[in-house]
Image: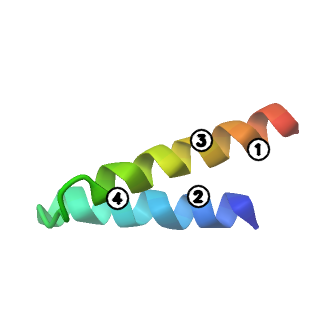
Amino acid sequence: MLYTIAVILLILWLLGMVTSYTLGGFIHILLVIAIIVVLLRVIGA
């Protein structure tokens, strides 16, 4: 479940970078959250 959310956030961030559509720091916050969730999954596994 958390891994799926992280992947979705990462895809949204990449789309934001490709289309140059950013909401200030919101896109980068999504990236940080995605990375943290993935790290927690790797460490917890």
Labels 2 and 1: the sequence-earlier one: 2
Q: Which residue position is annotated with label 3?
A: 36
Kindly state the secondary structure of the residue where label 2 is placed. Answer: helix
Q: Which residue position is annotated with label 1?
A: 41
The amino acid marked with disc number 4 is: Trp
Labels 1 and 4: the sequence-earlier one: 4
Calculate the distance from the C-alpha at mark 1 to the C-alpha at mark 4: 19 Å
Q: Which residue position is annotated with label 2?
A: 6
Mark 1, residues whose alpha carbon is within 10 Å: few (<14), some, or many (≥20)?
few
Calculate the distance from the C-alpha at mark 2 to the C-alpha at mark 4: 10 Å
Decide: marks 2, 4 in contact (CB < 8 A)?
A: no
Labels 4 and 3: the sequence-earlier one: 4
Kindly state the secondary structure of the residue where label 4 is placed. Answer: helix
Question: Which residue is most to the top?
Answer: 43
Q: Which residue position is annotated with label 4?
A: 13
Q: How far across and how far down the image is residue 16, in percent?
A: 24, 63
Question: Which residue is most to the left?
Answer: 20
The amino acid marked with disc number 1 is: Arg
Decide: marks 2, 1 in contact (CB < 8 A)?
A: yes
Calculate the distance from the C-alpha at mark 4 to the C-alpha at mark 3: 14 Å
Mark 4, residues whose alpha carbon is within 10 Å: few (<14), some, or many (≥20)?
many
Q: Is residue 18 left or right of residue 11?
A: left
Name the residue: 25% across, 52% down: 25
Q: Quadrant of residue 23?
A: bottom left
Labels 2 and 3: the sequence-earlier one: 2
Mark 2, residues whose alpha carbon is within 10 Å: few (<14), some, or many (≥20)?
many
